[in-house]
Image (tube, rainbow, N blue to C red):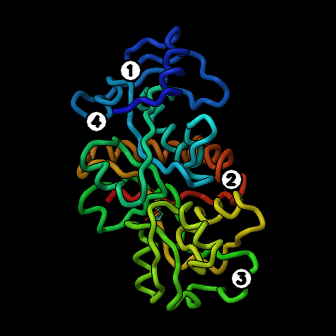
Amino acid sequence: MRLRKSLMISAIALSGVLALSACVDSGAPTEEETPTEEVVEFEAGTTMAELNEAGAITIGTKFDQPLFGQVDASGDPQGFDVEIAKIIASKLGIPESGIIWTETQSANREPFIQSGEVDIVVATYTINDKRKEVISFAGPYYMAGQSILTLADNKDIKSEKDLTGQPVCSVTGSTPAAKLAEIGAEPVLTDTYSNCLEPLRTGQVVAVSTDNVILAGLAAQNEGEFKVVGKPFTEEPYGIGLAKDDTEFRDWINDVLEEAYEDGSYEEAWNSTAGTVLEYVEPPAVDRY
Ligand code: GLU
């Protein structure tokens, strides 16, 4: 697996205080860094023990979705999903320098989990039965809903009803793409939502449709150009994808989420990322299916 240069540099920078052993604390954390757990012990043979011992975890997230997962100028992903992932890594006793971020697009999330290319996926990832056939989910940790983005001066599109027979951009392998076909729109599919913006600008599509929070991020990033219209018309419970039937790992991540709801770190993660644009809502109860 490829270790990005910035990670290598920060790993080297930290090496003075960070023993290579996984369960050793990285010393006093910087203000921005999610503190690593002091001492963590896991039952031998569990995924948690393996990751802890390796001192590294490969995490799939989005790289071009403002507020949830987007790489900054130095190539490090930022956003709410990224913060949730950092909380999980920290509870595994893995410092931020031990996180290997991998871009996952909507269509390759299940394959990346199935092949072991990533250990977990935290990427605006809707829990549903079809996906549960091949992977497992911890969570949900957030409830989004499908919505619509149009040009700021569009007066014709007010709800999903106005999308019938119209070309609408979304992403291959996503739940919104399937819903668009279901409601009689003409889905125009690409690989990431940011790739939908140019077709919207040029009039090749009349709207972009995906989760409200993704659209809110794109609208905020391109102020004055686009607007989110209508009410969310689906429920998109966001889960953390992991290998199918790794029940111990799933239960453990659910425990970590519940702890984060209790100790304020979930709310803090929200406020420092998506919360700069969107209102805070209490997290949904985890589903220990
Ligand atoms: N939450 C939806 C999904 O998992 C849409 C967002 C995305 O494609 O990441 O398919």
Q: Amino acid at mark 2?
A: Gly
Residue at 53 percent of width and 27 percent of height: 6
Does 163 sit left or right of 104 as displayed? right
Q: Amino acid at mark 3?
A: Asn
Q: Secondary structure at mark 1?
A: loop
Does 85 sit left or right of 112 as displayed? right
Mark sitting earlier along the chain (3/4): 4
Mark sitting earlier along the chain (2/3): 3
Question: Does mark 3 have its CB less than 8 Å from ligand 1?
Answer: no
Residue 186: where, in percent of width, then height?
46, 84
Q: Distance from label 3 to label 1 (Cα)?
A: 54 Å
The quadrant of the rendering that contains the N terminus is top left
Does 24 sit left or right of 33 as displayed? left
Q: Distance from label 2 to label 3 (Cα)?
A: 27 Å
Query: Badge 4 is on which residue?
Result: 47
Does 53 sit left or right of 143 as displayed? left
Q: Secondary structure at mark 4?
A: helix
Q: Distance from label 3 to label 4 (Cα)?
A: 50 Å
Mark sitting earlier along the chain (2/4): 4
Q: Nearer the viewer, mark 2 or mark 3?
A: 3
Query: Badge 3 is on which residue?
Result: 154
Mark sitting earlier along the chain (1/2): 1
- Splitting the image into 4 quarters, where does residue 76 fall? top right
Q: Is the residue 210 above or below the residue 25 in the image?
A: below
Q: Are marks 2 and 3 in contact (CB under 8 Å)?
A: no
Mark sitting earlier along the chain (4/1): 1
Q: Distance from label 4 to label 1 (Cα)?
A: 13 Å
Q: Nearer the viewer, mark 3 or mark 4?
A: 3
How packed is label 3: few (under 14 Cα within 10 Å), some, or many (20 or more)? some
Question: Does mark 1 have its CB less than 8 Å from ligand 1?
Answer: no
Residue 15: where, in percent of width, then height?
49, 12
Q: Nearer the viewer, mark 3 or mark 1?
A: 3
